[in-house]
Amino acid sequence: MTTNHDYPTLRMYIAGEWCEGGAGSTAPVLNPATEEVLGHVPLATVADLDRAAEAAVTGFAAWRDTPVAERTAILHQAADLLVSRSDEIGRTMTLEQGKPLREASGEARRVAGALRWDADDARRAYGRVIPSEEGTLLTVRRQPVGPVAAFTPWNFPAGGPMRKIAAALSAGCSIVIKASEETPGTAVRLVRCFEDAGVPAGALNLVFGEPAEVSAHLIGHPATRLIAFTGSVPVGKLLSAAAGAEMKPSLMELGGHAPVIVCEDADPVAAARRAAAAKFVNAGQVCTSPSRFLVHESLLEEFTEEFVRAAEAVVVGDGLDEGVTMGPLANERRLRAVEALTADAVAKGAKVRTGGERLDRPGYFFAPTVLTGVSDDAALMSEEPFGPIAPLVPFSDLGDALRLANSLPYGLAAYGFTRSTATAERLTREFEAGILSINHCGGSVHEAPSGGVKASGYGREGGPEGLDAYLVTKRVSHLLAG
Ligand code: NAD
């Protein structure tokens, strides 16, 4: 039973104070499982944004000069709070985003791990000493870039913001983050963990607002030194162009349209089970979600049967209800987009093997959908579906499959299934993607970098590369006799 009881009061967090927007304007936040209003998110004015950017300057000075051991201890304390509050964070997330409670609480616990990884990695942000001329100490230092402006979407209400907050604070930067206006409650709960752990005022600021206005203002603000964005390719292009016009570096984690190639020698049943399990996580609203299934023609029938069985075993419902394994789409835009992509594919000859329509109940529910006979010119084959639709397409030659896989401007995730080491190596060489999984469809891990190539963006989050964008390299030559 959904209640608003677990939903926090929505406020922005600027200079260590929880506040409403200066103009008092707000936007409603909906529960996608019921379409009920959960609360109202405050929207920032330009004056609010200026206060946040200025607070980030003061916060940067305090946080950068906090000894790294102390910063790390505070961030570990925040991670402990995230874990101990993961159930309440998860309930808030399910209410506003729709994903099943287990997934949501799991996400809250997982982000604590990401934070610990980055916090510990900051202790290894080594510079170097370079042999140089007599009497000169030549060193290279890695220092925090400065205040960061970050923008994150609604699909991972904890994971998205935490990638930015963890890396920025670990590196010694301050941050102004605009989390999604559609999932603000989770962001409020995350920020409280940092506040309670003792992050100084101004080092972490949370704002909401009209996205285009907020990003334009913060990117142009002289205080901002780095722009970090997760979201769609078109918006990423806009923001990176705006950053470029200011000569400010940016980190872009954008969308994809991940191909799965099931080779002739693969186990079709195991491949179908693993691919289907990944497909319906978060109702397909994952940037790395497998979304084009290229299956060797000799395996297509067996693969399709098992995939359809797995799709039909998904339990769709309100994420707060016991046993539900897939919630609604997060907003009405996604529901409309998924309906349109399915209708277009069917009009161009696709056959619906299961699903294919929204559920007859309130909320933005769409059935897990499997399509075969999808023509190359169906929009679904080139537009990221960001929903629970799986087009299955046969191929006869691996070279053709790779060409099709690489034919889009995206290059985020790719998946291959094969029993041959040589074929796996060919996939590794030829897939144009920043993230490749072979014989499984696993998610991201803290210890390895994630990010895209081509239009899927640049920069990496996680792993030893995760702090790179947040650190600048300074060459220091020190004439000792001076
Ligand atoms: P959208 O392009 O309108 O927005 C994507 C995100 O960017 C949202 O969080 C939005 O608030 C934000 N945004 C939009 N305009 C902005 C601006 N000018 N400045 C700053 N932020 C801005 O799309 P949407 O309907 O919210 O999501 C649909 C598409 O977005 C999906 O098809 C998918 O491609 C992409 N997406 C990708 C990710 C990811 O993890 N890479 C996450 C969510 C959405």
Image (cartoon, grey):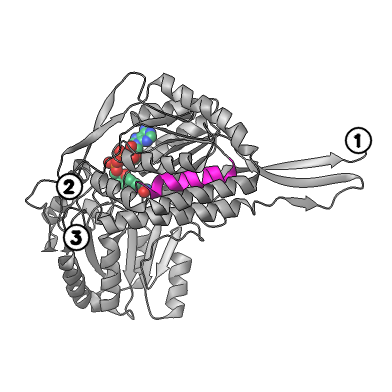
Q: Main secondary structure of the magenta part?
A: helix
- Read off the magenta span: 156-172
Q: If you read the primary sequence from the N terminus, does the residue marked by circle 2 or circle 3 appear first?
A: 2
Q: Is mark 1 within 8 Å of ligand 1?
A: no
Q: According to the image, label 1 marks what residue?
A: 482
Is 212 magenta? The answer is no
Q: Please name the amino acid that badge 1 sits on.
A: Gly
Residue identifier under label 2: 2
Observer-side mark, 1 or 3, equals 3
- In percent of width and height, residue 213 lies at 37, 26
Residue 46, located in which quarter of the rendered image? top left
What SS does tag 3 mark? loop
Question: Is residue 363 rendered to the left or right of residue 450?
Answer: left
Q: Which residue is mark 3?
A: 322
Please say if the residues under marks 2 and 1 sit with CB atoms less than 8 Å apart: no
Q: Is residue 452 visible?
A: no
Camera-side residue of 422 and 229 = 229
